[in-house]
Amino acid sequence: MLEHVAEVFGEPTGSPRASLAPIRVAALQAQVGLDQSQRDLPLQRQVSTLKWVLNLCKGRPEVPLILHVRGAPEDCHSAEAHLKVLTTVRERVAPQQRIHLHCFDGGMQEARRWKDAFPNVYFGYTGEVSRFDQEQGQAVSSLPLERILLESDAPYFRPSWVPNNNHRHPQYIAEVAIGLLAFRSGDTL
């Protein structure tokens, strides 16, 4: 993809990303972050891409930054991954930056860290909420409703009670809401 973009915008310094630096980002919406859920994903490239996008957002807190944070299988609540991304984001954008934490799977500590660092943070939840443990449920309950976003993330995440029939659709957004409301009301799924 970056190679194609370089063809369109030129590549004077040999780096496709460098040639994109002067682009206005008023309409930019990109999902970026760290995904360590699969061992074969090159972490250093993910980090450099994250830093590049953060630099595009610098001084533009009104531009929504959509962050994808997924830890390694042994990283409970993606805590290490969230800390890496949070540290990197703090270094590069203002606290007023609008942030959407896509497919948030963190616990209380991760939610608190993001809320404390960025008051304009929103937490996106998918059908994975049906697989959350008690700490993740407490994080859901602790967030103001106006900071929660419902996501289907179709076709990837479905609520556990929806049959796995290879048909994962955005139609299951109501089930995501039901899962979130169950945690907020103290019920169990």
Image (cartoon, helix red, strand yellow):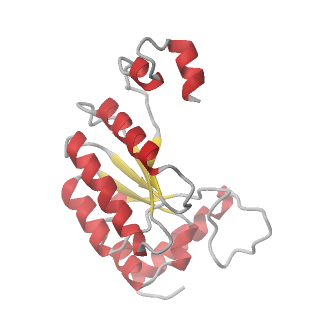
Count of labels shown?
A: 0
The image shows residue 79, relative to residue 13, as above or below, that is: below
As drawn, which residue projects farthest toward the right? 165
**Res 120 visible:** yes
Instruction: Name the image quarter holding residue 75.
Output: bottom left
| Front one among 164 and 148 | 164
* Residue 125 rendering spot, x and y as whole percentages: 48, 63
**Residue at 56% across / 13% down in the picture?**
8
Instruction: Name the image quarter holding residue 64.
Output: top left
**Residue at 45% across / 51% down in the picture?**
43
In the image, taking residue 78 as reference, residue 175 lies left or right, namely right
In the image, taking residue 41 as reference, residue 50 lies left or right, namely left
**Residue at 41% across / 72% down in the picture?**
77
For the N terminus, the quadrant is top right
Instruction: Name the image quarter holding residue 71.
Output: bottom left
* Residue 72 rendering spot, x and y as whole percentages: 47, 67
The image shows residue 90, relative to residue 123, as above or below, that is: above
| Front one among 141 and 63 | 63
| Front one among 28 and 172 | 28
**Res 145 visible:** no
**Residue at 41% across / 87% down in the picture?**
186
For the C terminus, the quadrant is bottom right
The image shows residue 174, relative to residue 131, as above or below, that is: above
* Residue 70 rendering spot, x and y as whole percentages: 47, 61
